[in-house]
Image (tube, rainbow, N blue to C red):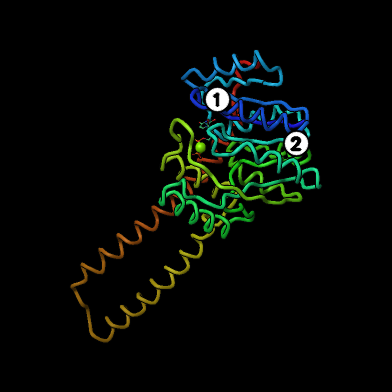
């Protein structure tokens, strides 16, 4: 059985059409399937539409979360509940074209445990988004012990063994792309062209993406924490050299009173550097704090 996981947040305008094209593809594959819709606290008519769809197709399951937990949490809920042998997370805004599922399954049957879908064309994104994404992947992959493939989203096929491995990762702060990569397994990639969103607006604004990037980096790298040791050494070395220089100069030429400018520059510079260091520490401590509370990632209100 194939499990298709669809997180939905205010997708009333997309759901029906999305379901139709998904169903068409799934029927063509000749496999039994289930479609899990995770209603992530939508405030529009999404839930009612889902209930209506369920009446005509018993392969649909609806997991209704108690509020908006965010896409990563909705996806986690879907992964926890999926029963299939192959699991496919997909966005319902048509940015992940359903026709790829046929190719996913083909590759899966050839023996791959993970089939990734790589966007070959990001022209549907703004220049800012594609540029920042590129920079992010470069930076992230440099400093982390895992390699998150560029231009690959959550849209992919994973086999049951991979899902079981993912379930072993207990963390609350879930950067799904990182978690997917961390577990490994035999992977292949197919390429596709990403369209722009069908209806409605993306809920991922610059601030949310920035936070996602921070989450990604702090989840899979401790480099930002450790780099302060080296910055500290470097600045200490500079200070020491400058100190020796000043002492020697004073010994030779006597006391030189003016120095306001250099003094203020050094104080401000060091103050700034220290605050950045503390900020990075805070970023990690905040995450330790949230993780130590051990709260569930999502709450299910009802399941249909
Ligand atoms: N989504 C969700 N919860 C959220 C935000 C988004 O379940 O809080 C779902 C949304 O319904 C869609 C998918 O996640 O199916 C991707 O969202 P979106 O298109 O807004 O993101 P983008 O494509 O811009 O990355
Ligand atoms: Mg989208």
111 sits left or right of 302 in the view: right
Q: Earlier in the sequence, mark 2 or mark 1?
A: 1
Q: Position of residue 69 (x, y in %)?
A: 53, 28
Give the residue pinned by disc 2. 86
Q: Residue at (75%, 46%) from the top-left corner?
A: 107
Q: Position of residue 240 (x, y in %)?
A: 40, 74
Q: Position of residue 273 (x, y in %)?
A: 39, 58
222 sits left or right of 243 in the view: right
Give the distance between the C-alpha atoms of the residues marked 2 and 1, in whole angstroms: 22 Å
Q: Residues within 10 Å of mark 2 (few under 14, many from 20)?
A: many
Quarter the C terminus occupies: top right
Give the residue pinned by disc 1. 15
Label 2 vs label 1, nearer the camera: 1
- Assess whether mark 1 and mark 2 are in contact (beta carbons under 8 angstroms): no
Q: Is residue 110 above or below residue 294?
A: below
Q: Residue at (42%, 48%) from the top-left corner?
A: 126
> 48 or 254: nearer the eye?
48
Q: Residue at (80%, 43%) from the top-left corner?
A: 109
């Amino acid at each position: 059985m194939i499990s298709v996981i669809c997180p939905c947040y205010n997708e009333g305008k997309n759901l029906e059409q999305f379901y139709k094209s998904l169903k068409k593809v799934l029927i063509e594959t000749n496999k039994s399937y289930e479609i899990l819709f995770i209603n992530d606290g939508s405030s529009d008519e999404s839930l009612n539409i889902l209930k209506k769809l369920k009446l005509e197709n018993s392969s649909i399951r609806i997991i209704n979360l108690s509020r908006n937990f965010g896409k990563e949490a909705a996806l986690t809920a879907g992964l926890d509940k999926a029963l299939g042998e192959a699991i496919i997370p997909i966005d319902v805004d048509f940015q992940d074209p359903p026709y790829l599922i046929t190719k996913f399954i083909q590759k899966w049957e050839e023996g791959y445990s993970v089939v990734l879908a790589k966007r070959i064309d990001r022209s549907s994104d703004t220049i800012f988004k594609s540029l920042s994404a590129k920079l992010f992947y470069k930076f992230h992959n440099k400093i982390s012990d895992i390699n998150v493939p560029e231009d690959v989203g959550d849209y992919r096929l994973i086999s049951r063994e991979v899902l079981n491995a993912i379930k072993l990762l207990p963390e609350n702060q879930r950067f799904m792309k990182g978690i997917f990569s961390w577990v490994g397994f035999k992977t292949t990639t197919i390429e596709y062209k990403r369209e722009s969103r069908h209806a409605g607006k993306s809920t991922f604004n610059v601030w949310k993406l920035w936070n996602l990037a921070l989450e990604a980096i702090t989840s899979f790298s401790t480099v930002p924490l450790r780099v302060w040791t080296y910055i500290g050494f470097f600045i200490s070395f500079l200070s020491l050299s400058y100190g020796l220089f000043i002492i020697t100069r004073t010994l030779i030429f006597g006391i030189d009173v003016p120095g306001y400018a250099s003094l203020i520059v050094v104080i401000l510079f060091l103050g700034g550097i220290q605050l950045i260091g503390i900020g990075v520490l805070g970023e990690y401590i905040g995450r330790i704090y949230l993780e130590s509370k051990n709260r569930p990632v999502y709450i299910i209100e009802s399941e249909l």
